[in-house]
Image (tube, helix red, strand yellow):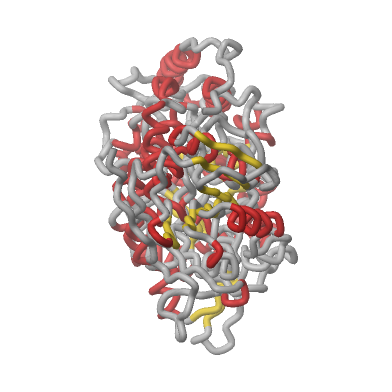
Amino acid sequence: MRHRPPQDALPDRRPSRRRVAGALLAAAATALGVAPAPGASVAATGPGAATAAHHRSAPYLDARLPVERLVADLLGRMTLQEKVGQMTQAERGSVDADRSRITDLALGSLLSGGGSAPTPNTPEAWADMVDAYQERALATRLHIPLLYGIDSVHGDGNLVGATVFPHDIALGATRDPALVREVEHVTAADTRATGPQWVFAPCLCVARDDRWGRTYESFGEDPALVERMETAIDGFQGTRPGDLARPDRVLATAKHFAGDGDTVYGTSTTGTCTLDQGVTVTDHAHFAKVDLAPYVPAVRRHRVGSIMPSYSSVRWTDVPGSTPVKMSADRELLTGFLKERNGFDGFLISDWEAVHQLPGDFPAQVRTAVDAGMDMFMGPYSAPQFEQALTAEVEAGRVPVSRIDDAVRRILRAKFRLGLFEHPCTDRTGIPSIGSPAHRAVARRAVAASQVLLRNRHRTLPLSPSARIHVAGADADDLGNQSGGWTVTWQGRSGDTIPGTTILEGIRQHAAHVTCSADASAPTAGHDVGIVVVGETPYAEGVGDVGNGHTLELSAADRANIDRVCAAIRTCVVLDVAGRPQIVTDRLPRTDAFVMSWLPGSEGGGVADVLFGKRPFTGRLPVSWPRSEAQEPVNAGDPRYDPLFPCGYGLTTHRRHR
């Protein structure tokens, strides 16, 4: 076990933010000329507090009223500048040096991009940071709290010491919706205990081409499987009225609407990617069946609170003369499909500077996206320019005030449902559970359930604990590699980046006689079993697209390790630690057992649990496994479907009797 760093240098966990919040409540009530009702909203003094004194009543401060009444009352008090501020999200790095900018811009939201963390990267430091930003938001005239968003896509991977779960593709392999719900409940609890109340997850993309660098963010290639795994939303948000306001729940984001997993190879508009941010070339029937299908239950059944439109575009093959339209500009889908046809009452948040990819100058880009239905704009370092542009567009009559009111109403609704007006500061009671044995046990079960056994000649697995084992491969003892992208930093990195258990350490928990050599150069004589761990190094998004320095082929070092170990030791087991299938067609016959281990995260012991029969193999492929890279895209239902392993394939074993 790689232990968490010492805690003796952490800041004192004093209730200073709670005392501040209480004082702010009294100040707000005084400024508004009312006495706060029981459970009333926390607010703040600030430069505009005196101007609010003429209000003789403030229903939005009374948490006993229905949410829609609270929203309507607050919206009716807001100026255009304040409304535009609510539609603006900035990166924390753009305001950290001068936090008064939060107040001056009346910002509605902040986010931490991948790797944007406080120093030190501890739970207490996160909570202190978010609460300090919140104080500046509460210093605005109407004391509207911030909504803080973060990419908790496989656990709170931004926080060193949090439990890092398998990525979504591995969770899709479990075929276990209840387990997925449990995983995301832990993620929600860890995230909110440190301040953020909103996660940019889960990804409901349907991955139709494994060359895509975001394949591991998808639950699989089958839209029906993706729909089954939408219990992730329930894990984040809860299912009962009032759950969102709990200290162990967060607002979820279904992303990336829609078709980002179904783009055509080589159609990117960025000049660097080959599938990411590309074009989905499709007809309406296919798009509805594959790409839109997961969003219907996400909205209607799971009541997801926010949706993030994709960078990608759609070109209709059944519409003569159709040209690609960026999703951020597609009113038919954003407003027509989501809001009008399916009754989505949450809000749409743009992806990182996505509006900048639309045609025209910046005011035209803003106008187009707002008219299409975008409600909040992730402009990490362009928040002032966005607010200026949108305000000018409204004042010129090019964007109707009714569209602004609709957007702000949706954002405020989420904030009231989250209980942010009553409790804007971080409830830190969940901090002791972060990285706890109970949370890690959930992750270890998820890892074991996700392992897919693709070959098991002569019933090689499960292994005997008394076997003399030689382990080879750089991925065997590398927490960074087994966690992948979106781990501490955006792209992730190799090495000892997080606390956890490597696959090698997990094997040593089960077997007494284990040797290891990263390059398979150590002597192999006298061993009963060779275990070769192959795979990918970390990447995220389009950086991982095949063609951007990446390939589905095994590396030369991995192929050499398989050749050496499988030739020297009678029983040879290969584990593939990767975010997508790799090409193993020529090496598979040399193995006795082959396991797809995906990206297990911090709990490599779960891999060893199935190798040694503590838990059975039950995982099934969530995507088709290609025979060659040239065979991609290959998906179940294709004409002449002939993958190496079909989607849904997976051998099973029984638990070893002790």
In screen coordinates, is 584 left or right of 658?
right
Count of numbered marks: 0
Q: Is residue 76 visible?
A: no
**Residue 40 screen position, x and y as percent:** 34, 23
- Residue in the foreground of this view, choosing between 63 and 534: 534
Which residue is outermost to the bottom?
A: 320
Whether residue 27 sits left or right of residue 615 in the image: it is right
Rendered location of residue 610, percent (x, y): 39, 46
Residue 297 in view in this figure? yes
Of the pair 225 and 285, the residue shown nearer to us? 225
Horizontal and vertical percent for residue 233?
36, 48
Q: Please state which of residues 590 and 304 is positioned toward the viewer in this rendering.
A: 590
Identity of the residue drawn at 44% across and 15% down = 18
Q: Residue at x 63, y 33 (%)?
A: 496
Residue shown at 29% from the left, 51% from the top: 654
Toward which corner of the image does residue 187 lie, by quadrant?
A: top left
Q: Left or right: where does residue 556 sit relative to residue 215?
A: right
10 in relation to 603, above or below: above
x and y percentages locating residue 565 in the rendered image: 61, 53
Residue 203's place in the image compared with 66, above or below, is below
- Which residue: 46% across, 36% down? 511
In this rendering, would 248 be left or right of 124?
Answer: left
Position above or below: 637 against 148? below
The quarter holding residue 550 reads bottom right
Taking depth in this image into account, of 107 and 531 the one nearest to the observer is 531
Q: Could you tell me which quadrant the C terminus lies in? A: top left
From this view, report whether residue 284 is shown above or below residue 32. below
